[in-house]
Image (cartoon, rainbow, N blue to C red):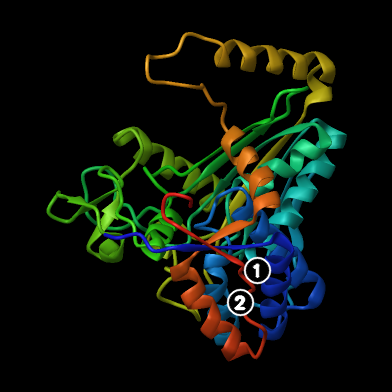
Amino acid sequence: MTAHNSYLTEAAELLAFIQKALTVAGIPDDDAKTVAQLMVQADLQGSDGHGVIRLPQYVKRIRAGGINVRPDIKVVAAKPAMAIVDGDNGMGHLVTTFATQLAISKARETGVAWVGTRASNHAGPASLYARMALEENMIALYFAVGNANHMPPWGGTDMLLSTNPIAVAIPSKSEPDIVLDMASTAAAYGKVKARAKRGESMPEGWMMDRNGQPLLDPTRAEEGFLLPIGGHKGYGLALVIGILAGTLNGAAMGKDVIDFNKDSVTPTNTGQSILVLDVSAFGNLDEFSGAVDTLIQQLRNSTRLPDVKRIWMPGEQSAAKRERHAVEGIPIAAGVIADLDPLADELGIERLKTYTTLSESAA
């Protein structure tokens, strides 16, 4: 496949565009701003499968009645170190932010807190919520059930599992914080979408067709399924994450998962869970963060293979992208712009401003 050009836009322009689109679609101003900020953060850090690329899909669900634009997000079960949040079918970004902030607040009192959600929706990349705890010098582990089943159980062909991601954020002292964000599949389905919009092929190992052959064309994704990381181990991880983020909270899992790519009306009952640890409850924060720094330096400075220029820490490249994109602009694939322009026209808002085209090599 031949890659198309991409475009650049400024973070402020992207924020204003997303916020306006969501507001016109029916989301209240403050909520639209919260969702837009998180979507821009996704694109800033290079998680382009979960940023503005999702806007047409969100608007479609909102306008079809598949998302509650004025949800009553509330706690329906709680103890000192846990809670379950009912999102009332609101935007997943709002529900998960509410749950994360609650977990942080509880962790201040109890040292550790677990908060789960149900009746939520797609909320973007997992790292957005794990990273919120870093601002409080806390550790966070985040789990979610994906919004469509793209993976069968190991050895099967029935789509009963999703990409079910996990994110872990650990504060350091002077080094970049450690932020692991990974799907339990070889690639998140959002990456498949992004490849299709950029006109790029997928590497072998991401997907397989139902005859057991590698599937490389992202536009033919419906003909196959995502592969788990590490074979049967990734399958087990997806299952466990789904139980912790879905089944435990009374949210969808297995056959109950709604494919929001195909169904814009039925509530998805998406589940997420976040575990927050207050480092200061376990010992001296300064000593811990210093020890994390030391470990990072040991790993980075360890002996490398001949062709390896640098050993990266989880989240380090995303942090570098955030800094670079904030200055140079956020790349938006031409295929995404092709979806955003008619959406803007349909909503009666100004199209997203882009100011530079990028060649494939520059992008």
User: Which amino acid is tagged 2?
Assistant: Ile
Residue placed furthest toward the left: 211
Where is residue 205 shown, x and y percent of the image? 27, 42
| Label 2 sits on residue | 67
State the residue at coordinates (57%, 16%).
300
Which residue is more in the foreground, 57 or 359? 359
**SS under mark 2:** loop
The answer to whether the residues at label 2 and label 1 have Cβ atoms under 8 Å apart is: yes
- Quarter holding the N terminus is bottom left
Depth check, front residue: 48 or 279: 48
* Residue at position x 50%, y 46% in the image: 165
Q: Is residue 223 left or right of residue 338?
A: left
Q: Residue furthest right?
A: 109
Amino acid type at mark 1: Met
- Visible in this render: residue 260? no
The residue located at (32%, 52%) in the rendering is 151
**271 lies left or right of 240:** right
The structure residue drawn at horizontal position 17% and vertical position 56%, both measured from the top left corner, is 210
Whichever of labels 2 and 1 marks the residue nearer the N terminus, that label is: 2
* Res 111 → quadrant: top right
Q: Position of residue 104 (x, y in %)?
A: 79, 42
Residue designated by label 1: 91
Q: Is residue 70 left or right of residue 235?
A: right
Vertically, is 326 above or below 167? below
Q: CA distance from mark 2 to mark 1?
A: 7 Å
Q: Is residue 95 above or below residue 174?
A: below
Within the image, what quadrant is residue 274 found in?
Answer: top right
